[in-house]
Image (cartoon, rainbow, N blue to C red):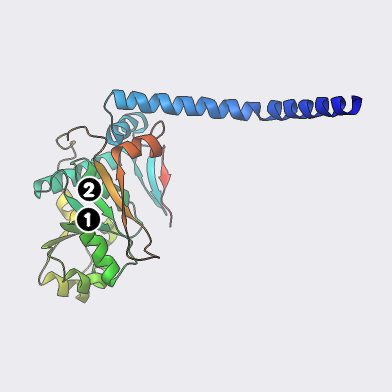
Amino acid sequence: MFHQLWASVLSLWEFILIILRTLPRDLDGLYKLLKHTVIIRYNIFRQRDFIQVFRKNVKHYGSKPCFIFEDKSLSFQQMEDLTNQLGNFFSAEGFSRGDVIALILENSLEYPCVWVGLSKIGCITALINTNLRGKPLLHSIQTVKTISIITSKEILSEIGSELKELNIKKIYLFDPKSTSTNKMSNGIESVSSSVETVQLYEKFEVCSAQPPKPIPYDLRHPVFYIFTSGTTGLPKAAVIKHSRFVEKNIPSQLVKFTRIAT
């Protein structure tokens, strides 16, 4: 009887020690969870989507790095100005809320600018794997009813044959400034015979960096589509909405800076 009682006391004491050891971690986690929840609900109450949250951080961080890629970076203010120019340009091109534009682009500072800028005018970006070719590529573009494409000169020269099967009249090139003025390759010239190509950086020179006309607040509206790898069939699109972004990807505020994987 005594041994059983002593064993119970030891077990209880070990349990108390475990609680005491993990209590600081648990309290810290609880605090972050509550803070996370309060900020999310506050942003929803104030009708803030991730664009409004980002602009709040632009005011706060300004010239500090927002995105870093290799030896280059974009500050919060540069990101805001560039995405405003992109949004204003595509709005002037006739794109509007609900239009889907495919993004087939290598890792670069320009990559996040596209879907942030397009979301400012309500357009939805389809993030398509640059390695896709043939039927999987065409399926990814067509399944979300894409009406135009943003890509680079190099990728365009590789997917020209697939794009000829699509009813797309204009393709936008978003190469880094250091390469955007280089001469087009033969692959692009063959595509350009039937499709107009536009260098975005050249157009942005005359675009306003002021914020585009605000779109209706709707957390259910998609920001972008991402696709499965297609290992068990053709790629399938997953919808990432403003609500998902506010609740999952921006717990309190957009991170001070993000390093793009190379």
Image quadrant in which the C terminus is located? bottom left
How many residues crowd mark 2 within 10 Å: few (<14), some (14–19), many (20+)?
many
Q: Amino acid under label 2?
A: Ile
Q: Residue 201, can we see it?
A: no
Q: Nearer the viewer, residue 102 or 86?
A: 102
Residue in the image at 77% along x and 29% along y: 14
Residue in the image at 60% along x and 29% along y: 26
Image vertical order of residue 190 relative to residue 71, above or below: below
Residue in the image at 40% along x and 38% along y: 248
Tell us which disc is closer to us: 2 or 1.
1
Could you say where residue 79 lies in the image, as x and y percent from the top left?
Answer: 29, 42
Image vertical order of residue 67 relative to residue 133, above or below: above
Left/right placement of residue 2 relative to residue 73 reads right
Could you say where residue 21 lies in the image, as x and y percent from the top left?
Answer: 70, 29
Q: Nearer the viewer, residue 121 or 138?
A: 138
Mark 2 and mark 1: Cα distance apart in space: 10 Å
Q: Which residue is tagged 1?
A: 144
Q: Which residue is tagged 2?
A: 124
Could you say where residue 77 lies in the image, as x and y percent from the top left?
Answer: 30, 37
